[in-house]
Image (tube, helix red, strand yellow):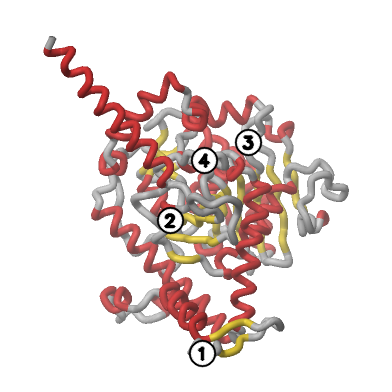
Amino acid sequence: MSILCGVPILECVYCLGCARWLWKKCLYSAGHESENWGLATAEEFAPVPRLCRLILAVYEDDLRNPLWAPLGGYGINPDWVVVKRSYEDTGGCAAPYMIYLDHDNADVVLAIRGLNLAKESDYAVLLDNKLGQTKFDGGYVHNGLLKAAKWVFDTECELLRDLVEMNPDYRLTFAGHSLGAGIVSLIVMYAVQNRDRLGNIERKRIRCFAMAPARCVSLNLAVRYADVINSIVLQDDFLPRTTTVLEDVFKSIFCLPCLLCLMCLKDTCTLEEKMLKDPTRLYAPGRLYHIVERKPFRIGRFPPVVRTAVPVDGRFEHLVLSCNATSDHAIIWLERESQRALDLMLEKDRIMEIPAQQRMQRQESLAREHNEEYEAALRRAVALEIPQAAYSPSYGTFAEVEKGEGSGSSSGARSSLLSFKRMKERWDNFIERLFDVDESGRMVFKKSST
């Protein structure tokens, strides 16, 4: 009898847990995760749409006669394609990729396409992993993606070294989408550890843009390599929010009724502190850029806003219940919305008529701010007792900038400086209060309402 009396209590607890789970899923839509992040600038975000188009070009069989080119074309010169590998060339060890020598942007680019739903080899790469299976540089990484990354690097390192040495002013950029994003992220980490095989290239010349990446590195590595890896996520994209095990992906997307109870209880009862201290838990790598284009309880898409940060906690931990969770993962939508966001940034800069000298100062300020944000993330990882997290000023590509500014400046003085992005936001708000834009696009003083 006493057991039966406890059944209604258990039902109430279960219903409250499900209600909290459902509320969290709905609450974390519309960019809630990144609401406290800073706004990205046009200078740092400019490569994203261009690299998205380059990744799309990998899908083409004949770049001179493209079949699926986006509006405006791919914007590439087929004569600058150094090598293009297909599934037959890779033997299923990695997704198809292309090496492109971009003379217009002083870039040597290796671009890898995303998951092919019709290829068993791509599924094999994703499924080849168990939590805690593979260690790398003091952390854990996805086993299958690391194997694919090593295969691509070992195959192309000599060619990349020759291209970098022949073009000493060019940067070495790795770009990928979905499955390819996870591969290029681990290629960069592996390349940083083996720079001697690339002609001892400087770390600051290496960078990665991972579009809609899979969760492939542990938290300490995700923060430590934030100076060379940039992850771009469109609104409610499901993949950066869930594990890379294929069965879990489908469970997370469709929420089958038979698994709903287990998922509700697991998501409700698991504390964030416990997740952060799990050394084998994988995350989206590097600095995060979140493109937000929808608002809660609103219909349609709004002008996209790009927010960026190097978060330690809150790295897209919650899957979002959204009808756009899968469409936001598509490279086509990512290219389209990133281009819209960049156009809005450039238009805003044009209206403000920023002089060239101030643009250079803004780029220097941006580099300093990224360095401060990067160091703050490393310190926070240590403060939160993230497993194997360690703060070391030797990490990162900005150490030379710090030395050039003089070693006498203290960390307290640097932390007291006002963030450039916050200054920019305050300045923008100040300008909007004083000026309007007329029909010709020029700024004029606002007329007094009185």
Which mark lies nearer to you, 3 or 4? 4
Left or right position of 408 against 90 = left
Q: Position of residue 137 (x, y in %)?
A: 39, 45
Disc 4: CA contacts within 10 A as few (<14), some (14-19) or many (>=20) = some
Q: Amino acid at mark 3?
A: Leu
Q: Position of residue 232 (x, y in %)?
A: 54, 53
Which mark lies nearer to you, 2 or 1? 1
Observer able to see residue 128:
no
Q: Secondary structure at mark 3?
A: loop
On residue 322, which mark appears?
Answer: 4
Disc 2: CA contacts within 10 A as few (<14), some (14-19) or many (>=20) = many
Looking at the image, residue 276 lies above or below residue 372: above
- Look at 41% across and 67% down and name the residue there: 371
Q: Secondary structure at mark 1?
A: loop
Q: CA distance from mark 4 to mark 1?
A: 44 Å
The residue tagged 1 is 448
On residue 311, which mark appears?
Answer: none
In the image, 266 versus 366, the foreground residue is 266
The residue tagged 3 is 115
Which mark lies nearer to you, 2 or 3? 2
